[in-house]
């Protein structure tokens, strides 16, 4: 069961409730499927036309290793290039992603708090070229899908550089053939 504040509950009970999806991806990038940009909590979610499909969110009592896929458009060449550049610019694996639902008033303002529907980490992305249509699928994994991951561990050249400028460890780590002995004093 999802608890919502009374203003959101009242908006949901209207004959024609108005709502939109809000998606936060690494970058940070904030996108909405609404016809105009939506601002909530001083953050503007852009209505760039990228979002095509937000699948239903499955909620269960048990902890599951489910993932979630958001589909974005890549039909228009300028849009496709922008999306490709965005995802190819750096490794975002493990960074936080959120999918939320917002109830809207008649002026496109968010009513009350947004409803968090899914939170996970950026897993991967793939291009699906099907002739006349081209889509990019963004896979978001449940945080429980990597239970052995050490909190704060940096595992790519991009995130290493962001935390330790000039450190090129992961850029050359693949060349090391011996066991590095993480955490050992030897």
Image (spheres, rainbow, N blue to C red):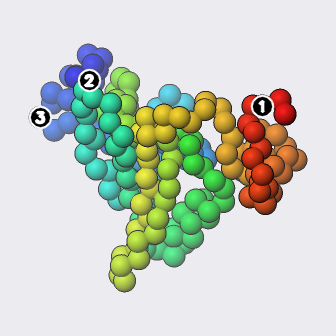
Query: Which residue shows up at 82% across the image and 40% down it?
Result: 164
Q: Which residue is mark 1?
A: 184
Spatial separation of the CA atoms under disc 1 and disc 3:
63 Å
- Under circle 1, the secondary element is loop
Q: Few, some or many C-alpha atoms within 10 Å of disc 1 (few <14, some 14-19, many ≥20)? A: few
Residue that protrudes farthest toward the right in the picture: 166
Considering depth in this image, is 143 or 35 the residue closer to the camera? 143
Q: Earlier in the sequence, mark 1 or mark 3?
A: 3
Q: Position of residue 120 (x, y in %)?
A: 45, 38
Q: Few, some or many C-alpha atoms within 10 Å of disc 2 (few <14, some 14-19, many ≥20)? A: few
Q: Quadrant of the C terminus?
A: top right
Query: Which residue shows up at 34% across the image and 43% down it?
Result: 66
Q: Does 156 sit above or below residue 126?
A: above
- Under circle 3, the secondary element is loop
Question: In the picture, residue 56 is in which quadrant?
Answer: top left
- Under circle 2, the secondary element is loop
Q: Quadrant of the N terminus?
A: top left
Judge from the rendering whether residue 85 lies leftward or rightward of residue 177; answer left or right. Answer: left
Q: Which residue is mark 2?
A: 2
């Amino acid at each position: 069961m999802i608890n919502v504040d009374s203003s959101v509950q009242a908006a949901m009970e209207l004959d024609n409730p108005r709502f939109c999806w809000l998606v936060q991806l690494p970058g940070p990038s904030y996108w909405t499927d609404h016809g105009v940009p939506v601002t909530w909590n001083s953050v503007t979610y852009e209505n760039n036309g990228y979002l095509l499909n937000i699948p239903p969110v499955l909620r269960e009592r048990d902890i599951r290793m489910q993932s979630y896929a958001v589909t974005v458009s890549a039909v228009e060449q300028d849009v496709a290039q922008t999306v490709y550049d965005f995802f190819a610019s750096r490794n975002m694996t493990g960074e936080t992603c959120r999918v939320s639902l917002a109830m809207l008033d008649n002026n496109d303002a968010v009513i009350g708090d947004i409803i968090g529907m899914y939170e996970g980490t950026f897993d991967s992305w793939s291009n699906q070229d099907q002739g006349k249509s081209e889509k990019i699928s963004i896979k978001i994994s449940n945080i429980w899908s990597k239970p052995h991951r050490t909190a704060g561990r940096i595992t790519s050249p991009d995130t290493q550089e962001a935390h330790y400028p000039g450190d090129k460890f992961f850029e050359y780590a693949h060349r090391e053939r011996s066991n590095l002995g993480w955490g050992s004093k030897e």
